[in-house]
Amino acid sequence: MRAMLALGRGLAGAASAVVGGGHRGAGAVCSAFIQPARCYARPARKKIRDIPSHLDDLPPTMMKKEYVNVPIINSVDDVVKRLLSLEMASQKEKMKIKTQQLVEKVRRSPDDNGSFEVQTAILTAKIRTYEEHLQRHPKDKSNRRLMLMAVDRRKKLLTYLRRVRYDAFENTCKQLNIQYALPPAYSRRVTKRWVVKKAFCIKVFQEVRKLKAPERLKKRREWQAKARAAKEKQVQSEGTAV
């Protein structure tokens, strides 16, 4: 009897061990299948918004700059026309057309290629291209620096035009759609140190003037004596000539 009870206990322990091992094995298998499945969950990406470009007003059927004045262009095949049009053109080729259009608006004569108005138009096309690029790539510091340099250069040209030829300045801003803002007046924050330093400089200037007053008075009397002698000499020469 005792032997049968011991055998039953042994069988029950073995069964529990098998069942427990099975559960652990099933958990390991499930975790092995679930873990790779989690890699398929993709993060939500921000939708790229459509940024308007200043090149959108160029018609796609317009020919590239190199083929505009070619006489044989009207007799070629439609496929060739499409290849030579702005529909298949790159950003650089479109920029040439846009820059030429802006230059035509403000140039003084057909042969004008370097006036202040033409330089302003060229810089305006570059600045607008940089602005569009930075809207898509705001961390591009190199192009941001180039854009700020171009803006500073254009501001200097417009300031000179405003001072020298105001009518050309107004026409340039109107044709190129530029909003010119006057530079702010110079202002300095008044501090206690600045007030004390200014008062000290004024006091030093007054003391120097007091020290140099006798010397200035002496020079003034010498100049007056020379002028008086020259006037008397001139009067004597006029009297002897008479």
Image (cartoon, rainbow, N blue to C red):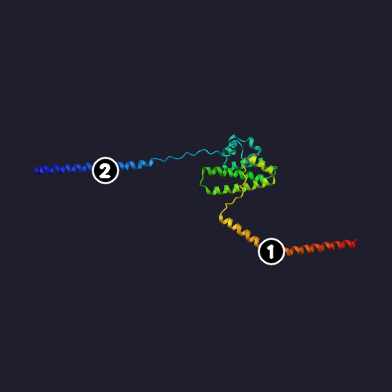
On residue 212, which mark appears?
1
Q: In this view of the protein, can residue 224 be seen by the observer?
A: yes
Q: Residues within 10 Å of mark 2 (few under 14, many from 20)?
A: few
Relative side of 43 to 147, left or right: left
Q: Quadrant of the N terminus?
A: top left
What secondary structure is found at the residue carrying circle 1?
A: helix
Instruction: Name the disc covering residue 57, or none.
Output: none
Q: Residue furthest left?
A: 1
Q: Residue 64 location, x and y as percent?
A: 61, 40
Q: Secondary structure at mark 2?
A: helix
For the point 63% across and 37% down, the residue is 73
Q: Is residue 115 visible?
A: no
The structure residue drawn at horizontal position 65% and vertical position 60%, both measured from the top left corner, is: 206
Image coords of residue 227 (percent x, y): 80, 62
190 or 1: nearer the viewer: 190
Q: Which numbered dot is residue 25?
A: 2
Q: CA distance from mark 2 to mark 1?
A: 106 Å
Residue 105, percent from left and from top: 66, 40
Above or below, 216 against 147 in this view is below
Q: Earlier in the sequence, mark 2 or mark 1?
A: 2
Residue 239 occupies which quadrant of the picture? Answer: bottom right
Mark 1 surroundings within 10 Å by alpha-carbon count, few (fewer than 14), some (14 through 19), many (20 or more) = few
The quarter of the rendered structure image containing the C terminus is bottom right
Please give the name of the residue rendered at 65% of the width and 37% of the height, measured from the top-left corner.
Answer: 72
Query: Disc 2 marks which amino acid?
Result: Gly
Of the two numbered discs 2 and 1 in the rendering, the one whose residue sits closer to the viewer: 1
Residues marked 2 and 1 touching at CB (< 8 Å): no
